[in-house]
Image: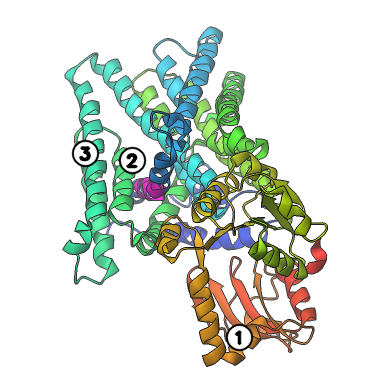
Amino acid sequence: MPHGHSFQPLLMIMGLAFVVPIVVARLKKWIPFPPVVVVLLCGIAIGRSGLQWVQADDVLSFLSLFGFVYLMFLSGMEIDFRRLHTQARRMPRGRPWGSDLFKASILFALTLVGSAGVAWVMLTLGFADMRSFPLMTLILGTTSVGLVMPVLREEEISSSRLGQMILLSAVIADILTIVALSVVLIVSTRGMSWDLIVVFVFGVVLLASIKVGDVVTRRGLLGRVLAGVSSTQIKVRGSLVLLLVFVGLTEAIGLEVILGAFLAGALVSLFTSSEHSLLTHELEVLGYGFFIPVFFVMVGVTFDASVLTGGWRTLELLGLLVAGAYLVKVLPTLLVFKGIFGLRRAAAAGMLLSSRLSLIIAIAAIGQQLGLISRETESAVILLSVVTCIVSPSSFIKLLRRRRASRRKVVVAGAGRIGRELIKRLRTQNMPVVVIEKDPGQLGKLPSGVPVILGAAADPETLRRSDLGSRDSFVAVTGDDSVNLEACLAARDIGSVHQVVARDNNPDNTDLFARNGVVPVDWTGTLAMTLENLVLRPGLVHLLTHEGPQREAFEIPVERLPSERGAIRDFADFSETLFVCVRRDDEMIIPHGDTELRVGDSVLALGPETDRRALCRLLGGECDDDA
């Protein structure tokens, strides 16, 4: 069938999107950049400034725009409103400054003040004038959500408190920048006109939509409407309809469409709280599988390298912009984040929040078209986006992973009878343990050599002294359910811990623990289940609880995968070990010889102690001799 477009450019783009993450994963030691940055650089190589194999025609430009819109939509879905709501309920009435939303807003306000200061320096040095002053302030104040979110997801911290605060700060910066840009452009081109009411109208729509979403969630109205419709496809279509409704609304009233996309994602998150995980997975497959990779490659394809020939004046301006861009982000982030996450992770957050990409390029292009900034300034801004999108994610990952380099440990809150037994069992497995206990009388009953922190389990300062990290586990086993829940929530917020588990003394509280993302251990139910298994499945209980040099059950996380060890059949030299199951996200896979392992999997196996140690060393897990 004859047509005016070729599929070859799209093939090149999707080919890069497929191959690059595989190559980066294999060459992680030699490629310090996240895959999204490498994809962008490859786009430059095949685009207008490189081999010119791909040109930005109407179709690819639209797919790229929709990819950016879809990315903002998924960013809205990433905001954990349940966490914000729980945190707001825990705040004393009349003291909102303890909430993450308030902290993120303060961070943006400080950034904006610093950005205005840098813009004033540019004005003094002759790089800007009063007409360009507002635009330069906005350019320096924003953050690229489009780059921040993929990096957080690749590092698997988007749902932690650190990830949520970084994402929230980035989203606030982008949304308020877009709204402020709309005001600046209206005033610059039309003066103080009635068009400014548009911004107010959109704010009203935003608040009304959030209220509607809250009512729909609490009353279960959406579940009733979709009763009898089991297909997730309907929910995906409904989500896309909502996305297009809000994108069309913002487009009609003259605001940036990505603002409507983010709002649509936030509403989907509110509407579908109970089935959020499955729907999110389906929508992410659509976005990250096609539209979003097209966006990142096309950002590189459309990059104009001729801006590099702007002369020393452009380079001087670039140096000032780069220094200012990091200064106005890193310093405020240190001020706001340091007391919560510590110096290193606060610095890592500041570096990631310094990344800027398509939004500042769009602001610069609009400013140059309207005569508000010079071509020289536009070129420097484009170069700023390239520098920050390369340096910022890499610096963030380096700082974050340095914190992760320490060995995984378990922090146990409560040194009572159950806590002491747990500590003893963990130490027999050579797992590092740190104990938190407020009663000095219990300390003498603990095994010798166990690090102990004297203090309340839910006290943030006590938890910081335990040096909780994202790879650690936190277990609260006090006799008070409210203390256990508060301690687990505080540990998750402060340390972004890998796993939080709580002793559930009252079965009526099990749902409360689960709703807050804490794994509850119902003492009555666990004992009954153990007795049931001993009666009906005694062999299985013996298999899972047997400890000895001959054969034992164990689980190993796959943190690295040698190139010659891709499938189960490649582990034939472990002939005494039976690979029972591979756990991948929420899926349990019964392995066969051709079952491929992936980084991030957990392997459940049965075998001798020597094989367990060897597999630990091979796959990057932690062994008894790692200490």
The nearer-to-camera label among 1 and 2 is 1
Query: Can residue 240 be found in the magenta stretch?
Result: no
Location of the N terminus by quadrant is: bottom left
Query: Is residue 479 positioned above or below 430 on the image?
Result: above
Picture coordinates of residue 383, whole percent (x, y):
54, 32
Instruction: Give me the C-alpha separation between circle 1 and circle 2.
Output: 54 Å
Examine the image and state in which quarter residue 2 appears: bottom left
The nearer-to-camera label among 3 and 2 is 3
As rendered, which of 568 and 46 lies closer to the eye?
568
Q: Residues within 10 Å of mark 3 (few under 14, many from 20)?
A: few
Amino acid type at circle 3 is: Ala
Instruction: Give me the C-alpha separation between circle 3 and circle 1.
Output: 54 Å
Amino acid type at circle 1 is: Val
- Provide the residue designation for mark 2: 258
Residue at point 65%, 42% (across, down): 462
Location of the C terminus by quadrant is: bottom right
Q: Main secondary structure of the magenta part?
A: helix
Q: Earlier in the sequence, mark 1 or mark 2?
A: 2
Q: Are marks 1 and 2 in contact (CB under 8 Å)?
A: no
As rendered, which of 255 and 113 lies closer to the eye?
113
Instruction: Give me the C-alpha separation between circle 3 and circle 2.
Output: 19 Å
- Provide the residue designation for mark 3: 208
Q: Earlier in the sequence, mark 3 or mark 1?
A: 3
Picture coordinates of residue 368, whole percent (x, y):
39, 23
